[in-house]
Amino acid sequence: MIKEWMNEETLRFTKLMEEFTLKEVAPLAKEVDELERFPKETVEKMQKYHMMGIPFESKYGGCDAGYVAYAQAVLTLSKACATTGVILSAHTSLCAGPIATFGTEAQKEKYLTPLCRGDKLGAFGLTEPDAGTDAGSQKTVAIEKDDHYEITGSKIFITNALEADIYVITAMTDKSLKTRGISTFILEKGMPGFSFGKKEKKLGIRGSATRELIFNKVKVPKENLLGKVNQGFKIALTTLDAGRIGIAAQATGIAEGAIEAAIKYTKERKQFNRAIKDFQNTQFVLAELETKKEAAKHLVFEAAKLKDAGKPYSKEAAMAKLFAANVAMEVTTKALQLFGGYGYTREYDIERMMRDAKITEIYEGTNEAQKMVISAHMLRS
Amino acid sequence: MNIIVLVKQVPDTTEIHVDKETGTLKRAGVPTIINPDDQAGLEVALTLKETIGAKVTVLTMGPGQAKSMLHECLATGADEAYLISDRQFAGSDTWATSKILSEAIKTLDYDLIIAGRQAIDGDTAQVGPQVAEFLKIPQVTYVEKVHEVYQNTITITKAYEDYKVVLNAKMPCLLTVLSDAYTLRYMDAKRLFETAHQPIPTLTNDTLSIDVEHIGLKGSPTRVKKTFVKAVNDKRKPLALNPEDAANKIIESLRSIS
């Protein structure tokens, strides 16, 4: 069991997240999905209780608690509401993360601190209409002017779009260099020329705000260049390595939530004069799902521990995400089957969990992209 | 302003097992929580800390495992915490417990002491008032709301069964608080990690030096003969009647009372 090796404070933090999820997140999950509503009030409470900067240094307002605690937070939230889980994950590992890793002291003070303190929400933009896994085909360009860059282009499928105040985005500074010509910038909502497209209608995580970012000659001060010029692709890959721990935790949380829902249902539901938990098929299915979910959890926390220890974790994070996403999909599908016809109705949460699980196989690198990362680690020498 | 909050770790269940030999509660292995009324007491203290500024010190008497609860109190916003623990204190009833708590409180600075009205495991509601008596300070029990503090006067609403009184009390004083009016905030994630290694001093009888005749089982005048759950004696009887007969039955019953 993961909890056996957690230190006392991380266990206490887990207790906090469980209580918070039970009282604040779970009661809203159905409505947030049904109305495709961003759970702003929950985000405000998470900001108030300083849950928005879990792995970052306390001098910037973070908890200094590492990725183990952060993964635990995303996992716990996602058990009840995957939308809330991804809001925290995108904010923490995709926006605050690269600023913490690559930012200058001034950038950290200006942007990381309000992100951690809960004054600002963050988002990250890499994907474009014609550049998904093929990030080198980006069309968004940043042209160097006297004291600023002028950014033109667009990003799609951006989590927390419009709701967020701070955006870490990539743009081409030298098109001829392909991926080696990408740079990263910090943008603020409200910059002239920076606007948002319509909200995407999605299969799952429907409360999460997903929109297009549109840049029309946005003037970005030079001090908002994150890292060095043309270092953007490396920053993006590093950011996604960490992000995968968050999404793997989200997937594991969805699986855990689905198993708990199935246990509750199979104890209550009677057929042939017995609770359906008493049928061996139910027992065997639950045993298999639990085993896979725990295996996923171990991969998630292994990657988180490696990151906390300052060791390479890119391969482990990719494996955790690949495996956990598959497990989330399998667990929710098979758990729904245990519900029979009721599981297919929106009366129960299990169909939402199944819809939510699918995205974990796609975003922050598809399953196929994870396999590219993993095999690249295996075959290089 | 210095506020001392008395808290107790209680079993998170109504199923309590009693040691048949001593008639006291078995606490090992049962999930625990901060006693609900004490949670309200801590929230009152933290609200005062926020509004007028105060140092909040949390005090509990109990076994070593109660430290985890005190860490939760620190994560919620308390500034300091003390554990009062000694083998000599084991088996204390409310009288001996109040004596020990009051001796511990005497070693600290305070303007206000806040206790929960009662603990859900014993339900005596005696410890708060007895502590005030041992300390010879005024007490207000069943506090529902703390309104304001002006110089050394605190304004509060005290709830009786069917009416309420707003009154001023001179500090230092002791309040016992009801859980209904205040919900304890969540632990603050940042504070939780910041206070993770804050020392929690243990006060033993080496420091308090209370005469052993006044503490533990020896110092407890209460003798528990037997602990049991009272059977509900429900005199209500369901009657299947049509509306007209039901109305007549009700009128008849009411008449028989008057």
Image (cartoon, coloured by chain):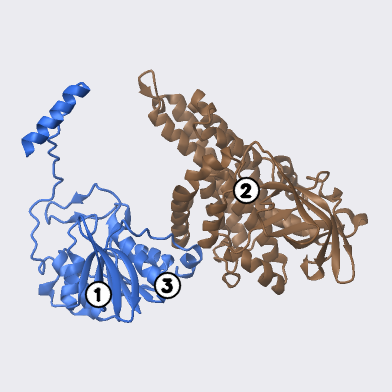
Chain colours: A brown, B blue
Residue A140, compared with residue A201, is above or below; it is below
| Disc 3, SS | helix
* Marking on residue B51: 3
Quadrant showing the N terminus of chain B? bottom left
Disc 1 residue type (three-letter): Ala
Horizontal side of A339 relative to A149 (left or right) equals left
Quadrant showing the C terminus of chain B? top left
Q: Position of residue A265 (x, y in %)?
A: 43, 31
* Marking on residue B169: 1
Which of marks 3 and 1 precedes in the sequence? 3
Residue at 44 percent across and 62 percent down: it is B187
Q: Marks 3 and 2, how far apart in space?
A: 40 Å
Residue at 22 percent across and 79 percent down: it is B208
Q: Mark 2 lies on which chain?
A: A
Q: Position of residue A355 (x, y in %)?
A: 60, 35
Which of B200 and B118 lies nearest the eye of the viewer?
B118
Q: Marks 1 and 2, how far apart in space?
A: 55 Å
Disc 2 residue type (three-letter): Ile
Mark 3 crowdedness (10 Å alpha carbons): few <14, some 14-19, many ≥20? few
Q: Where is residue B227 in the image (x, y as percent from the top left)?
A: 13, 50
